[in-house]
Image: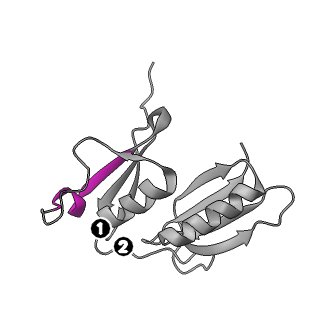
Amino acid sequence: MGFPRLQSVVLDTPDARGLAEFYRRLLGLEYRPGDEPPAPGQDDEKGRDWLVLVGDGGVRLAFQQEPGLKPTTWPGGEIPQQLHLDTSVPSVEELNRQHERALSLGATLRFDRSDDPEEPLRVYADPAGHTFCVFVGE
């Protein structure tokens, strides 16, 4: 008996192209062929609907246009996070370097536990309000 294969993690967003660009730059992913940004001045039809980024090991992160998305308020309880992405780095030094990169790309720091000796981490919101973690680990 077989099992379904996880195809993609999909993030709803009011700006599919903008959020795809954020994660492309943050995680070093590439556009699926045909989803690249159009030439300057050209219509970005795909950027208003559905885009896919791909990476090593078959990782696929997709973006679906959803104009009415309400960003999570985590750690506050009004709008729960419902889904978040975990990423890891090998050292506290790299955690600090990635902190500056994430902020420069438009992330917002939501929670800082970078001084925890067991598992240093920071939690951010991406430009659409989805949370993601960067922690020191394997």
Q: Please tell me whether residue 55 is drawn above or below residue 48 in the rendered image.
A: above
Residue furthest toward the top?
1
Q: Position of residue 78 (x, y in %)?
A: 54, 81
Q: Is residue 121 magenta?
A: no
Q: Please tell me whether residue 71 is drawn above or below residue 42 in the rendered image.
A: below
Image quadrant occupied by the N terminus: top left
Label 1 amino acid?
A: Glu
> Which residue matches tag 2?
69
Is 122 on the left or on the right of 74, as rendered? right
Mark 1 touching mark 2, by CB under 8 A?
A: yes
Quarter holding residue 76: bottom right
Label 2 amino acid?
A: Leu
Which residue: 44% across, 40% down? Answer: 55
Residue furthest toward the right?
117
> Which residue matches tag 1?
66
Which residue: 41% across, 76% down? Answer: 70
